[in-house]
Image: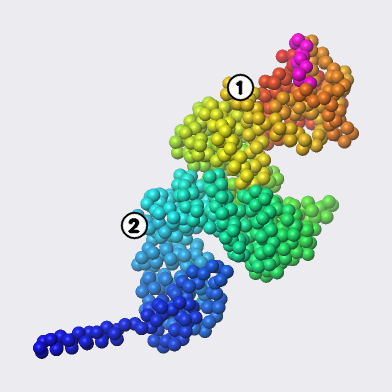
Amino acid sequence: MFRLRCGTSCLRRLLHVGTVNRDQVLEQLRVCSAEDQVLDMVGKHKAKLTVSHVSCAVGMLWQFQREKPEMLRTVELIRTHPQFLTLRVLAENKIALMNDFILVDMLYHFLRLNVDPRDTLVQQMVSEAWLRLDRLQMASLSKFAICLTDQHLQQSPLMGHITSIVDQKLSSIDDARILTILMISTSYLVSTRLRDALVSRVDELIDTMDPSNYNNLRRVVQFLRNMKYSYHPLLEKCNQLLLSSISQLDAENISIIMGLYQSLQFNQCDFRLAAKKRLIELIDSSSDPFSFSKLFVALAPLASLEIREGLENTALLLADELNAQQALAVAEALEESQSRNLTLLNKIASVIQRNLHVYKPVEVARITQALYLLQYQNPELFTKLRKIMVNFLQHSFLPQEVTMLTRILCMLPSPRLEEAIKSRVEAVVNQCSLNNLNTISSAISKWVRNDPSYRHNTPSKYVHLLQILNCSSHERLQTADRLDLLLEELKYSSGEWFEEMLLEETIVTLERMMDQINWNSVSDLGFFLTRMNHLCPPLMDRIASVVIKEIDKIHHSATYATLLPFSILSYDPPQADELYDVCIQRFTPHIRSFDPHLLVLLAYSLALADRFPEELIREIFSIDFLGKLDSQLETLPDSLNMRTRMRLMELNRAVCLECPEFQVPWFHESYCQQLQKKWNGSVSPVQQQIHKMLGEVLGGINFVQVAVITPYYYTIDIEFILDKHLQPLPYTTLSTLQISDRGKVHWGLSSLENDKHELPPGAQRVAVNFLESKCFCRNSHHMRGEALMRKRHLEILGYRVVQIPHFEWNSMELSTHDAWKEYLKRKIFNELSL
């Protein structure tokens, strides 16, 4: 009995202690259902709040906010609440008592609740976390990295320390979420070696990852974009998983992913089509300003005219409710989709104008560019934007920001360059990349041309500034020692200033680095040479040699850019056949994984080089492929859409003429007729001159036709017919095409119809074409692939072709009327008698 009484007494004591040890404050905090309840609890119990209480309260405040839609969040009300200040003071006083997990977690939540990064609370928490950095668990380390990114400390020594830890412990990171967060956070400090190791590790983890975790996949793509590393095997794997979870993606994520793909030049037709379908499904559920603005930005550039008009009508109704960022996003989407909805544009511009005071420098530049490209007519608004940008420029020390502001400022009407712009450019010039220097120099050159005083003399301030930019550019080229970095800087460099001032030295620099050309750089280098229209046999021979040796390492999609300079510039290296053969063998097994428009462009480039791989041609001219291409073209920008359609027509023509054995039908008749109707019939002064002189040489204008349309719709500058004795044959009055005083062609009988008439035995049609500078490489008289293919096709059609290069016709030697006539006689009768 005594023992039982004693046991009961002990049990009662234990239960009493358990009750006393229960943390009632913590329990009451955890059952709170709203922010005001949490803050009331803080006010009632502030004298006895522990680290756990403070951590719980701050975490719940953020959790309540996180669960709300963006537009319903009340972060500012919380941040200004008196009891939130109490929480901040308590947290700051208890930093030393926090364990590692709570320290990082609370820092993360305070930043999410918009506590200023300059606040002493945040600064002390960051300092404390730095002291504990080497012992933080990977989950806490990744969250701390996010906190540093929020404070724009991506390139700080502290982030460098985190990068070093990631490098050391990479093999032990098994969570894809933790790894992808660390990849994004450290991407500005990662070496090429670590980049490759991170890519390899995340590639392993993706295979075991749940595809519904699309944020991990998005971060992988973002990492590659930050690194400017278009690694196709990993991108393709991410894309397949994103496609499988497309039904879970919202408009914002779709927009982000498509933007990342575009930055990486990763064309993905399947994703764009699936995204378009998903976005259309989201239209009915996107009725508030936040969700609708995200939807509009993602869908408007992809949508059909009917859907776009519906989106624009909804945007008009919601315009007054848009905030500053949403209005900017809608304006850029209107520009991308080339909208002409003036009513909506006026509305969006008025919202932007109300919010001009909140925009950052780059945002003001983006607004100005969008409105300018939309041809928006509001001088008052553009004057305000210009004033704001000049003010921002005066206080900017970031090369990228100064470059962008300068580029946009030069778009706007201004008689001269302000001193403020000049001084800021001079201040950052030594930090600028070649692309920045090229952009700024092009802007200054435009100001020079527009300055009224330029007609009399070039102001010394322009000359001095351009000299500084020129010297800095040449110095950057002369000191460059890494090909990959140089090619990255050259990726977007173009324009008159670059071509005149830097191109030759750039080629010299690239030749100096020739030994660095490897499988990873051949496509970028090939694309640069093509874009510059510069024939450089040593570089191209080196590209060919590397490609032949290392073709297995080159991604199949990169064969297009790699072959471009050889086909476009019509250059055959010593191993030309082997080069084309290995590239064709490389991409053929992957034909169906190419984007449809890219496959058309690839086939066209090969056709220029007179190469028609049968499997490629049969794939492109199959019903399934053409249907898929049609679907894709609806989602492409107008310029790329038109270019692809034109290349398909030219490929169709080339296959019909050069490979009749493939039995591909000519199905572009109506398309070519539409193009013909759009052509205004203008003939250049040089063509008129040659037409007139040929009339004199041949004995009369009735022996010569101008602007003749051939079968398959080539336009010949001038045509005439010679009999077997090389004597000209006259055209009938009906079939003669005359030129008006204004250089317009008056059409008589179509030359297509005229072709039905058989020529006398031994007679031949002669096509005379004037070759402008665009038919040749920039740095030589070497003819480009398009001009050679045209000549080849005209000869198949039965013409003898006479080509008149611009540099011969416009030479000093042919400066008189008689000299031109003699030249034409030699060209015609000497060449045709061979």
- Say which of 10 and 535 sits in front: 10
Percent across and percent down for residue 471 are: 65, 51
- Say which of 400 and 69 sits in front: 69
Dot 2 or dot 1: first in sequence order is 2
Percent across and percent down for residue 303 are: 63, 50
Spatial CA distance of label 2 from label 1 is: 60 Å
Residue 660 marker: 1
The residue that label 2 is drawn on is 172
Q: Which residues are magenta?
A: 754-766
Residue 115 marker: none
Nearer mark to the viewer, of 2 and 1 = 1
Residue 384 occupies quadrant: bottom right
Task: Note whether residue 129 is visible.
Answer: yes
Q: Secondary structure at mark 1?
A: helix
Q: Secondary structure at mark 2?
A: helix
Q: Residue furthest right?
A: 741
Residue type at the position of mark 1: Pro
Residue drawn at (67%, 34%), measured in percent from left and top? 777
Residue type at the position of mark 2: Ser
Name the side, left or right, on which 132 lies relative to 480.
left
